[in-house]
Image (tube, rainbow, N blue to C red):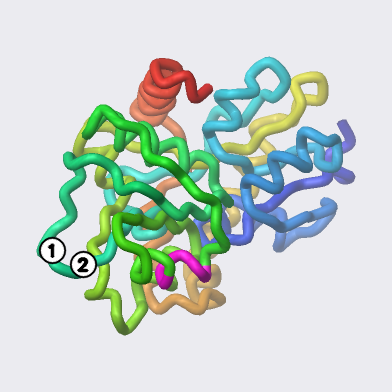
Amino acid sequence: MNLATVRLGLVKHLNAHPLDFGFRKHGGHSLHEDTPARLYSMLGEGQLDAALISSVECLRNEHRFAYCRSVGVCCSGALRSILYFESREGRKELDLKARPPARIHADSGSRSSVALLQVLYHSSTGGLPFLNSMEPERIPESVLAESDSGGLLIGDAALDFTERPDIDRFLVADLGQWWKDREGLPFVFALWAYPKEHPVADSMFEESLSAGLDHLDEIAASSRFSFARHYITDLLHYRLGTPEWQALQRFRDRLQALDLL
């Protein structure tokens, strides 16, 4: 493949900007920005040559997609941008070992986050929640308005949610920490994927990340979030090692057991 003409799918959220900084800064590629879920569809339809997509879709589509083995969006504990929440009314804490609420309103932009919530709720309660896809800006108010409901927000929408002046009206669980508490492992949310018949060298993605890591202050300064530097340096990491591969295998095992692959 002529690397100068690669059609790349980039995720619009802050958590991906260190990974794609080199591509955005240096040009030479055709760049398309969207959610991981939409980028997955575009990749499958042949509209993109490579894209940053949800790790669960990499695991579900290994028959047709390969993916970069060295970099991705990872956390090792709380990350602030994948949040499950319920209304606080009448309660002091969120009981994650109780049955799931009757309905969970989910931002389906990241299918890894949706699948992870299903896995975590099943491992904690033995039940699978009913998930209702909804626009992220509507989810908090719907959770407050409806009894026996929950919400799932991802990416920048979740970061915005943490800064609501009425955040105390909600009980919140961070999925990165929930997974770490149960499995003792980091989690990998997104990976660079491409069609198996048209491979892209890992070095291309590694070079873009290296540029991003060299310009973290610039990335943080361009964000609307005052905590951006802490978020992309302390809460997230971008290189895959043995623990991350163990986490992906554990996630695969949990998904297979629930017939979610």
Q: Residue 176 location, x and y as percent?
A: 32, 46
The residue wearing badge 2 is 88
Q: Residue at x 16, y 49 (%)?
A: 95
Magenta segment: does it hold 138? yes
Q: Residue at x 42, y 72 (%)?
A: 141
Q: Residue at x 46, y 36 (%)?
A: 115
| Residue 228 appears in the figure | no
> Quarter-wise, where is residue 75 in the image?
top left
Element assignment for label 1: loop
> Quarter-wise, where is residue 190 in the image?
top right
Q: What residue type is disc 2 on? A: Arg
Please report the bounds of the magenta region as a residue range. 137-141
Q: Residue at x 68, y 15 (%)?
A: 63
Q: Nearer the viewer, residue 43 or 128?
A: 128
Q: Residue 182 location, x and y as percent?
A: 21, 33
* Mark 1 closeness class: few <14, some 14–19, many ≥20 residues within 10 Å: few
Disc 1 and disc 2 in contact, CB within 8 angstroms = yes
The residue wearing badge 1 is 91
Magenta segment: does it hold 11? no
Q: Residue 235 location, x and y as percent?
A: 34, 55
Residue 45 numbered mark, or none: none
> Quarter-wise, where is residue 67 in the image?
top right
